[in-house]
Amino acid sequence: MNDDQLRALLEDTRTIAVVGASTNPDKPANRIPRQLMDMGFTVIPVTPSAEEVLGQKAYPTLADVPVDIDIVDVFRPPAEVPGIAEQTVEVGASVLWLQKGITSEEAGRIASDAGVTFVEDTCLGSTSRRLLQTGSA
């Protein structure tokens, strides 16, 4: 996707489910969701290891999230991503976004086959800051 397409996608986004959200403020899986919240996005932590992350109720799985999800943002190892892609399709999210350093050809295929936009190996936080806060390409 080019910057104009990413900007349009982000401008249409309200709710981001963060799979693998962390309670540890030193981890990107905590810092990035915090940045997204600061930018005005609704962030829903998805992790079985905590009841709350960043003051938000955490859910053990995507299927447990009681609201519509625009983007599923993934902070999990590549081996887990195909299963997360299947869950993303099941909950009807429109975007599967894999954080920097995470790629999965199989997840890309699952998402694409279901009409879900797929972004991999890209930081959602820095991309949002770059495209929405500065407005520059």
Image (tube, grey):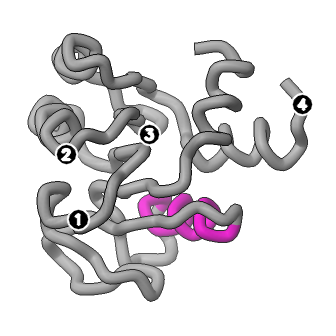
* Residue type at tag 4: Ser
Q: Can you give x and y, in whole percent of width and height, for residue 111 in the image?
A: 25, 22
Q: Can you give x and y, in whole percent of width and height, for residue 59 in the image?
A: 21, 72
The residue carrying mark 1 is 65
Q: Are marks 1 and 3 in contact (CB under 8 Å)?
A: no
The residue carrying mark 3 is 99
Closer to viewer: mark 4 or mark 2: 2
Q: In the image, which residues are magenta?
A: 28-38
- In terms of sequence position, does the residue under pointer 4 or pointer 2 come before the other? 2
- Mark 1 surroundings within 10 Å by alpha-carbon count, few (fewer than 14), some (14 through 19), many (20 or more): some
Q: Residue at x 19, y 56 (%)?
A: 62
The residue carrying mark 4 is 136
Q: Quadrant of the C terminus?
A: top right
The residue carrying mark 2 is 91
Q: Marks 1 and 2, Cα distance to the nearest angstrom?
A: 9 Å
Callout 1: helix, strand or loop?
loop
* Residue type at tag 3: Gln
Q: Can you give x and y, in whole percent of width and height, for residue 72 in the image?
A: 35, 45
